[in-house]
Image (spheres, helix red, strand yellow):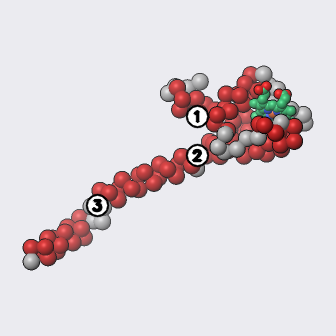
């Protein structure tokens, strides 16, 4: 009998106070959103599109050991920075980056550096 009363009270509370009572729902939703924003990091996605269309097209033929993937690109951020921004050796040949693409690569590189060192480059 008491169980039935508890159940009724819980139901009344649930419907009068709104539907957000179970705290677990918030927590699940938060970690779900976090997981999504890690895999769908727009900075990384933008950079990958550039690496894939402007760099991999040539690397696949002329530098097979350095084909960028979404899994290996973060580990190569320093090398990309050095070749593209400091030494300005890449992209080779006729392939050019637009200023928007330079900006997007830099945004991605600095987000990696922020993550590693906790401060901006
Ligand atoms: C037209 C061909 C071509 C394009 C386009 C190109 N690369 Fe390369 N890349 C090469 C070749 C060939 C090598 C290996 C020989 C060398 O280092 O010159 C290389 C080497 C590299 C290296 C290693 C260099 C070192 O000495 O450690 C990096 C990093 C790199 N490329 C990044 C990029 C990035 C980032 C892009 C695009 C923005 C890009 N490359 C576009 C041909 C290209």
Relative to 84, is 78 on the left or the right? left
| Label 1 residue SS | helix
Q: Are the two marked residues, 2 and 3, in contact with CB atoms closer than 8 angstroms?
A: no
Label 3: how many Cα within 10 Å (few below 14, some 14–19, many 20+): few
Residue named by callout 2:
41
* Disc 3 CB within 8 Å of nearest ligand 1 atom: no
Residue furthest top as drawn: 87
Residue named by callout 1:
111
Query: Is 49 located above or below residue 120 in the figure?
Result: below
| Label 3 residue SS | loop
The N terminus appears in which quarter of the rendering? Answer: bottom left
Residue named by callout 3:
22
**Residue 98 appears anywhere in the view:** no
Q: Are the two marked residues, 1 and 2, in contact with CB atoms closer than 8 angstroms?
A: yes
Rendered location of residue 33, percent (x, y): 47, 52
**Quarter occupied by residue 93:** top right
* Residue shown at the point (30%, 65%) measured from the top left: 19
């Amino acid at each position: 009998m008491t169980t039935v009363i508890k159940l009724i009270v819980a139901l009344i509370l649930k419907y009068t106070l709104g539907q957000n009572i179970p705290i677990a729902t918030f927590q699940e939703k938060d970690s779900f959103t976090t997981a999504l924003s890690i895999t769908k990091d727009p900075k990384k996605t933008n950079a990958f599109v550039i690496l894939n269309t402007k760099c991999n097209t040539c690397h696949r033929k002329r530098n097979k050991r350095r084909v960028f993937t979404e899994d290996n690109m973060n580990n190569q951020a320093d090398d990309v920075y050095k070749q593209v921004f400091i030494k300005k050796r890449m992209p080779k040949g006729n392939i050019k980056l637009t200023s928007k693409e330079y900006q997007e690569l830099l945004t991605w590189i600095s987000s990696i550096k922020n993550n590693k060192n906790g401060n901006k480059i």
